[in-house]
Amino acid sequence: MKRSRLILILLTLSLALAAQNNPYGIDDECYVLYRKAETALGTTGFNTVNNQLLSKAIQKGDIKAQTLYYVERLKNATELLQDQKTTTQKQDAEVMELMEDLKRVASDLGQTQYFYYAYDIAQNYFFYHDKLVQTMELVQDMREQAVARKEPYGIWMGNRYIISLYIAQNDYISAKKYILEALRVYESSDDPLIKAESATRLYCEMSDTFPIGNDSVQFYLNKADAARLQHMDTLRCEYHHAKLAAYQRDVERYEQARDYCLADPSLYVISATAPTMFSYIDKLVYGEELEDIDIIYMSQHLREVKYIANIAEEYGRKDLAFNTEKNLVAYEEKKLAESNQSKLTEIEAKMGNTVLSAQVDQESLRAKKASRLVLFLIIFILVVVIVFFVIYTRSLKKTNEKVRLADAAKTRFVQNMSHEVRTPLNAIVGFSQLLSLPDGSFPEEEKEEFAGHIINNTKMLTMLLDDILNASAMDKGDYRISYEEGEMNYMAEAAISSAEHRLQPGVRMYYAPENGDPYTFRTDPRRVQQILINLLTNACKHTVTGEIKLASSLTEKPGYVTYSVTDTGPGVPPEQAEKIFERFAKLNDFVQGTGLGLSICRDIASRMGAEVYLDTSYTAGGARFVFAVPCKPDEPQQ
């Protein structure tokens, strides 16, 4: 094999490349044979024509055509197994062997794009047969290879494959950071292999990571339009413009884009359910009756369901929007449980452990119990949210505009909570199932890491629920301040101990009092610690490098104990200094939290005669929050 490869390389160096008048830039005679091989994939005549391609490529000294011979071998192997629902270990091994052959030849002949295309073909094969663990292993290996080889094209393609995997599972939140990385590589690279490809799809996918009413949607669609290189780019742009135009009530633009999409037979490549989506949107735009959305039929493109819900709300169909979101959450929870079970089954097959089968059955029962618990918690949270908003809405006696804004805030909160609650719950269920596997499945240090993730996500979930219940208690007037003696330094150190588990790796948190001497004053120590913990937790969420400092002073504001929390995060624009203290306000939708923490801090502080605010004069980088507590508060008469 090595000798034949050496002969192949010597021949390519000794022969000139023939005329190239085809899309692949290979010899025209080789191109004819390549097209025949493509047509013969999966048939008995494939090997004959593919061997003819190799012979002609060697004769012409065309190294790219020679590489395509190995590409076709790998594609043919996967095509032959296309109709099988499951594949054997032997068949999987044969695909992997052909993939390694293509990688080796592509590397030897300097055909970088086909080195990574080998991963693409194999990944599609495993993903098609629901072998997600092996798919992700290939993606990870490809990215590591690209970094080790310092090849931007490999990094670019690796990110694109991960994006496709996440989007195939309707997980745009996880896909977002890889989309940004792929765009960074594309926009900064001068690699001709990268620049020869279109970034339109990435820009369109980036627009899908934002709520439809966000200005970033239009921003990224404009960039997608500017990056168009081919017909499919235009079709993809019009597909996204149609949805946005419907939301913006631009009926003329919607009809233009919709008709363009429906007239193109290639629309199914972008979305097989697009015609159904347009039929739902038509009924909303033209004011026709629309009862329910068939989520199961549209399950491959759940983002379209979310768009329909958003458009329904914009057109005043709030009940339809709320029911669609609720049904969507229930469907995604069901698919999550099924996905976890599928991954367990694949792990069992890879380990080849026959004893594991019986224990997987036990885990299935436990998973069902866990799913019931998850469902109960979600119902409980939704009930709390609904009760909270009923109480909150009844207390409003203002203009119709404020009522509309409150209703919009409710919808955003429910949508946000569906993600915020699912994230820690999914982690708890997933890692609990992995810990339940038999001894020897994972090293002890990995089990300890899993346990740490479970504890951390449990604390995160508890904090989310505490925020909701605290806000509800304040609205009902059930929140009480109990005064007693509190020691300044002790309360600060206790707050740091409670919040330090939220620190991101490499970030330092410490206490720096102006004076280390003890100082005792009348206050509610529990409420002081609660506010400090909330401020520290908020800093932990936004600080990925550097430090978080909690300081105290008796001189910064005479008559007050002044605590301050300073971080090295991205900071807060001065014009947002008050907005961040509003309920459900979040400057970054992708940071964990309900948007209630700072609002609760200010509410508690006002009941104590204290102040909580953002120090807008701080310009050293990051943000500085100040909490000033009176040393001699006005205590209510008993």
Image (cartoon, grey):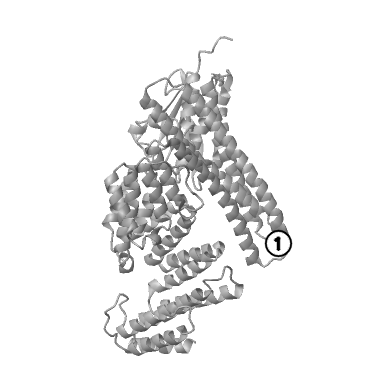
Q: Is residue 252 left or right of residue 609?
A: left
Q: Say which of 186 and 317 sits in front.
A: 317
Disc 1 on helix, strand or loop? helix
Residue 102 in which image quadrant: bottom left
Q: Which residue is mark 1?
A: 357
Location of residue 175 with respect to 286 vertically, above or below: below
Q: Is residue 59 left or right of residue 351?
A: left
Answer yes or no: is residue 503 visible: no
Answer yes or no: is residue 111 visible: yes
The three-letter amino acid code for the residue at tag 1 is: Ser
Which residue is most to the top?
Answer: 637
- Image quadrant holding the C terminus, namely top right
The spot of residue 604 in percent (x, y) is 50, 24
Residue 345 in which image quadrant: bottom right
For the point 57% across and 20% down, the residue is: 478
| Numbered-mark total | 1
